[in-house]
Amino acid sequence: MGTINKLIKTLTILLAITTLTAFMPPSSATFYKKLKKYCHTLPNEFNQISEERKKDLIEMGNFVIEKRTTGKVCKLLFICTSNSRRSHMGQIWSQTAATYYGVDSVWTFSGGTEATKVNINAINALRRCGFSITTSQATDNPIWFVSLGNKIGGFGIFSKKYNNTINPKSEFCALMVCSEADKSCPSVEGAELRIPLPYDDPKYYDNTPSQDQKYDERCRQIAREMFFMMDYVKEKLILKVESKK
């Protein structure tokens, strides 16, 4: 038991360090070419987002704006049932969108109502977008290292409960990305704001001919919506700066 606890502590420290480096890329940082091309196409699809959905994303964006205009770190926690697919996509794409639009001090996290492992189909869908995602661990729940590009610090992901020690404990926004977690967690302790933001689960297409297509569709939907949200944040932050001149 002592060895396991020591390992958990070591991994938590490692994840904290690698995660923090992702939030402040140097000015010379560049996305991987394939990922950059993928990201450039997302704003062209904002019209595919329903007006009802945009209201939720704008509410999320206003939380980011409020934190940044008051000089506080913005913490976003994506929650689903098993922390294996959608919540990781939400975490990764929201962090990527913040980096893409140059909105600093946005820290993103994910967790589940239970811990399992990050699903390999979700990993592969993200890889097809242009992320570098690797692991050197042969365990039931390995840590994956996610990289966005050259000179951009990466961060670690693994499956965990939403109240894991690495996740925020206060002043964060909880995004409920599956209906099951939304129902089972009507309140999230420490959350300043809780927003239901459900996505259809691609797991139902595992081991079918449509598997990759459905994972790619869900991955792109989440990417599109996180970019819409952060595009809104960037525009509002610019207007606030301009109004003070």
Image (cartoon, rainbow, N blue to C red):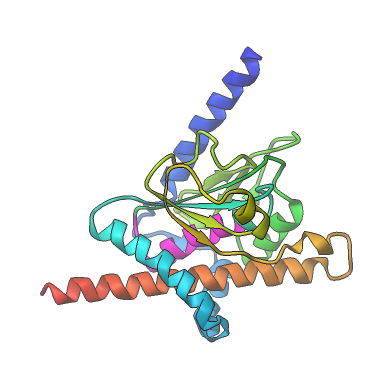
Q: In the image, is 189 to the left or to the right of 113? A: left
Residue at 54% x, 38% y is: 163
Q: Eyeballing the image, is 200 above or below 117?
A: below
Up/down of 222 relative to 95, above or below:
below
Is residue 189 rendered magenta in the image? no
Judge left or right: residue 50 versus residue 216: left
Residue 15, image x, y percentages: 52, 37
Using the rendered image of the protein, determine whether residue 132 is visible from the camera's viewpoint: no
**Residue at left 70%, top 62%?**
125
Quadrant of residue 61 within the rendered picture: bottom left
The residue nearer to you, when weighing 233 against 17, is 233
Q: Assign the N terminus to one quadrant of the image.
A: top right
Percent x, y of residue 95: 48, 58
| Nearer to me, 42 or 32 | 42
Residue 33 position (above or below residue 12): below
The image quadrant of residue 100 is bottom left
Residue at 63 percent of width and 49 percent of height: 184
Does residue 74 appear in the picture of this structure?
A: yes
Q: Which residues are magenta?
A: 89-104
Main SS of residues in magenta: helix
Q: Position of residue 59 (x, y in %)?
A: 41, 68
Q: Position of residue 21 (x, y in %)?
A: 42, 45
- Total numbered labels placed on residues in the image: 0
* Residue in the image at 34% along x and 71% along y: 234
